[in-house]
Amino acid sequence: MEVSRACSLYSEEGLGVTALSTLYGGMLLSSIVPPPLLIQRLGCKGTILLSMCGYVAFSVGNFFASWYTLIPTSILLGLGAAPLWSAQCTYLTILGNTHAEKAGKRGKDVVNQYFGTFFLIFQSSGVWGNLISSLVFGQTPSQETLPEEQLESCGASDCLMATTTTNSTQGPSQQLVYTLLGIYTGSGVLAVLMIAAFLEPIRDVQQQSGGEKKSPPFWSTLLSTFKLYRDKRLCLLILLPLYSGLQQGFLSSEYTRSYVTCALGIQFVGYVMICFSAADALCSVLYGKVSQYTGRVALYVLGAVTQLSCVIALLLWRPRADQLAVFFVFSGLWGVADAVWQTQNNALYGVLFEKSKEAAFANYRLWEALGFVIAFGYSTFLCVHVKLYILLGVLSLTMAAYGIVECVESKNATRPCDPGQANPAEDKEAETKT
């Protein structure tokens, strides 16, 4: 939330965009090597604590916003983001499998529920964050609505020309900026203290599951992120996190700028994003519960069809100020689809690569960060309709590759075995419980 606000608050001389690009560049680099190493050396709890300090540092850097503060703190945040997500996902996967073993349930079902609950809480932060920023910045008076002829350049027709007039607001006062930053920084510090005080160390959980394993050699851990590409399933699944980053980048930049801000004004961006976050949060916990009945394939089909419909509609729709409800419908439907990518992608990686969780989630964050980098990279020189066509193409390829993986998994689960040979389905089930 604060990261996206920095991009709009510090747009002069490209500081905000540069900080955002630096952040995701750092995240891209940190996805390659550090997560497995940090998790092995510090444990999941230690990695989470260390990584969260990068977020707090970025908050503090915004108080003294300049090239000398935002760029270094953006690098710190980016370097901490991938280890943080990898450690969180590893922690949830181990806890889910441990609970499943004790309760006599299937590991993948419990892991799905854990990720659903996690993303309910995570996405709800978007509701509160956008509500706080909207209430704080809502005290700034807005300009008048754009004339009818200028609305023609909004939506898919927007080619982001520098001379195009947009519907925006007067910049917030420094006092309001400091108020918002103070809330964000205080929340970050409180989160670090709560994790330090209440989160159970993951090593204790591993011991409860059957003892702590011998640590692998340093260089084996260092190269584990790349070694996992020997698994053809991972090579096919890299499009899932890549598309996740692309579609999130489109919503947070193109939709909010070329649709909401252009037609309604920047004062509505926070409220539209609240609708997205609320739908995302509610659907996350819902998918976590219903996945054990519907299976993950049905949810992936739901997410793909929903987002495919939204992209086609955004290509055809011409936003107008008197269509207020439509802006919220699109953001809500986008949240319905995004909840599929967030919960099912992480659960899928945790189940398929349970024995290499740290490396698998590091790869996931690597490709998701690349998706963000690409989305923000071409944001300033491609027309919106071109970006929508890119989303259509990548989504189609993503679902095709995912379908191949599911077919392979289905054949492995049902393939008859020779006498004395282990059953792949039984091996798969046993693997999810280890």
Image: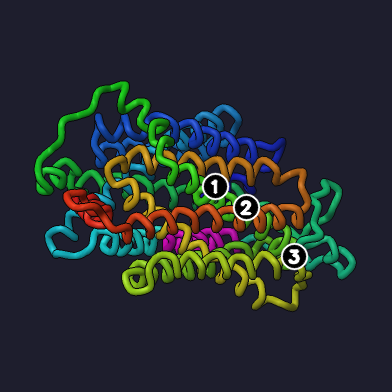
Picture quadrant of residue 79: top left
The answer to whether any part of residue 383 appears in the image is yes
Q: Which residue is mark 2?
A: 394
Residue 126: say if magenta: yes
**x and y, in percent, of residue 32 in the image:** 44, 31
Residue 329 picture location, percent across and down: 61, 74
Give me the residue at 40% from left, 29% from top.
33
Q: For the magenta stretch, what is the residue range?
A: 123-138
Image side of residue 292 versus residue 251, left or right: left
Mark identifier at residue 129: none
* Label 3 to label 1: alpha-carbon separation: 22 Å
> Mark 1 or mark 2: which is in front?
2
- Is residue 178 highlighted in magenta? no
Which amino acid is tagged 1? Leu
Image point (38%, 42%), residue name: 360
Amino acid type indicated by mark 3: Leu
Res 315 label: 3
